[in-house]
Image (cartoon, coloured by chain):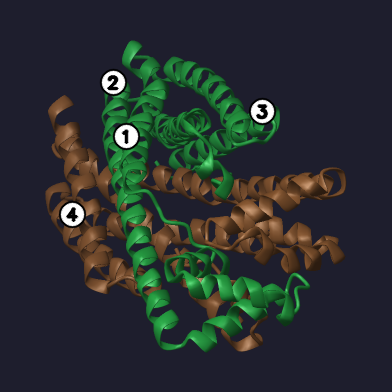
Chain colours: A green, B brown
């Protein structure tokens, strides 16, 4: 996942907006790819067990919709709460860093020297940098947060939007493998249609996902398709073996 | 999630091992908390739809095991492949940084000055730092990777171990809500036992998760329990409404 560089934050509005929209696309694709995988595998799995029932297709649609509701809530709400905890963690580390700058400035200066030594910078070469940070405690704190701890301030708005986008996309992705079971009461036929439709969708979404996360489209498309196929195959054979 | 600071990497073996074991606990808890949530919600959901069937409990166990197989593969393999892509992304960015240092050193120097200006460090105060990095191109490259792009080299061993731990923990967590349906053929009774057992397990795992990710145990326990409860409640009412 590409993180926002310091430079991006300093750029004017247009590139920032570009960044935002590609983050949203990423969330849509993540939610949808997961939504395509698990409900698809579940429907295929139950097909292996209830194929001979009169109302097999209805049961699959019911179980599929229950899974979609559960998965969307777990993924969306879980992701939102995880982001909130991450922000709390960031703020508590920042308070600790502020206390250390006030109470143990010599120790913090030492940390900068040791940090820079890893890049071949000597203690004497660090002196002007340290003097500059001492002039500006907020800058010093932010410097330690980013360079010592590797933490960036999480955006709470972004977490909320991201959780909602992922949850809704999970629902949209999860509906696709269920469509054939809604259209046909013949479970065997619906299963074949669901496999074809969903693998095609996984391939397409994997490709989009690959393009947006900076990797190659084809490799990502194959990965997404293979994960979905393996998950569905495993679910199908397990369910058939035990039923 | 607490990232590994530069200092940790320089510490001797003991703290590093401590970090490793707490990462494993975190993976166990993440996999298990998710495994507890979605199969639990699915079982509760299907209970709302098949309560009056003779073999309702069998159907729930079949669907639950199919979901567990699918979820463990999607989560474990998906996580592993995502980690691999992240590593590829890291290496490609590093090659780009190496090229830029050779081809556009003036531009890279400018980037350091602009980066440091955010912390109140002047151009003149950056000069010794820049000279030190120019002496040592590998250090310069690593400095830009970490300080400009905020990227740390992902550990491929860690990604594999983490994916396996999360997948296995998902299975272990997912079995818990199914146990009552395996033990009793009375779906209503099994549902009540599954709700009690799983909410208790979610609470316990949420607590452990909170302790290990540096947040408060109780808040995390309540969060995990509420997510699982909401997901299961939603799945139950949706399944009952449509069946």
Judge the density around disc 3: few (<14), some (14-19), many (≥20) Cα neighbours within 10 Å. Answer: many
Identify the mark nearer the N-term, 1 or 2: 2
- Same subunit, labels 4 and 1: the answer reads no
- Same subunit, labels 3 and 2: the answer reads yes
Residue A231: where, in percent of width, then height? 52, 39
Q: Residue at x 40, y 71 (%)?
A: A93
Q: Indicate the chain on which mark 3 is placed.
A: A
The residue where tag 2 is placed is A54
Q: Is residue A2 left or right of residue A62?
A: right
Res. A157 mark: none
Q: Nearer the viewer, residue B53 or B226?
A: B226
Identify the mark nearer the N-term, 3 or 2: 2
The residue where tag 1 is placed is A68
Q: Which residue is drawn at 55% across and 42% down?
A: A8
Q: Quadrant of the N terminus of chain B?
A: bottom left
**Disc 3, SS:** helix
Q: Which of marks 1 and 2 is in front?
A: 1
- Residues under labels 3 and 2: Cα distance? 42 Å
Question: Circles 4 and 3: CB distance less than 8 Å?
Answer: no
Res. B190 mark: 4
Q: Indicate the chain on which mark 1 is placed.
A: A
- Residues under labels 1 and 3: Cα distance? 27 Å
Q: Which of marks 2 and 4 is in front?
A: 4
Residue A39 seen in this snapshot:
yes
């Amino acid at each position: 996942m590409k993180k926002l560089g310091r430079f991006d934050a300093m750029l004017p509005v247009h590139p920032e907006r570009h960044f935002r929209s590609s983050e949203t696309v990423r969330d849509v694709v993540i939610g949808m790819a997961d939504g395509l995988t698990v409900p698809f595998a579940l429907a295929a799995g139950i097909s292996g067990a209830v194929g001979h029932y009169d109302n097999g297709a209805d049961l699959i649609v019911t179980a599929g919709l229950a899974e979609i509701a559960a998965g969307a809530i777990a993924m969306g709400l879980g992701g939102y709460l995880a982001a909130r905890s991450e922000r709390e963690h960031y703020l508590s580390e920042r308070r600790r860093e502020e206390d250390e700058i006030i109470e143990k400035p010599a120790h913090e200066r030492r940390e900068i020297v040791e940090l820079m030594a890893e890049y071949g910078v000597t203690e004497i070469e660090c002196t002007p940098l340290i003097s500059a940070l001492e002039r500006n405690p907020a800058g010093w704190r932010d410097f330690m947060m980013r360079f010592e701890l590797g933490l960036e301030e999480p955006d709470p708005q972004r977490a909320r939007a991201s959780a909602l986008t992922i949850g809704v996309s999970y629902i949209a992705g999860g509906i696709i493998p269920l469509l054939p079971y809604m259209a046909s009461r013949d479970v065997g036929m619906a299963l074949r249609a669901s496999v074809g439709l969903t693998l095609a969708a996984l391939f397409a979404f994997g490709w989009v996902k690959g393009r947006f996360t900076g990797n190659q489209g084809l490799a990502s498309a194959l990965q997404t398709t293979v994960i979905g196929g393996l998950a569905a195959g495993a679910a199908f054979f397990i369910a058939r073996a035990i039923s």
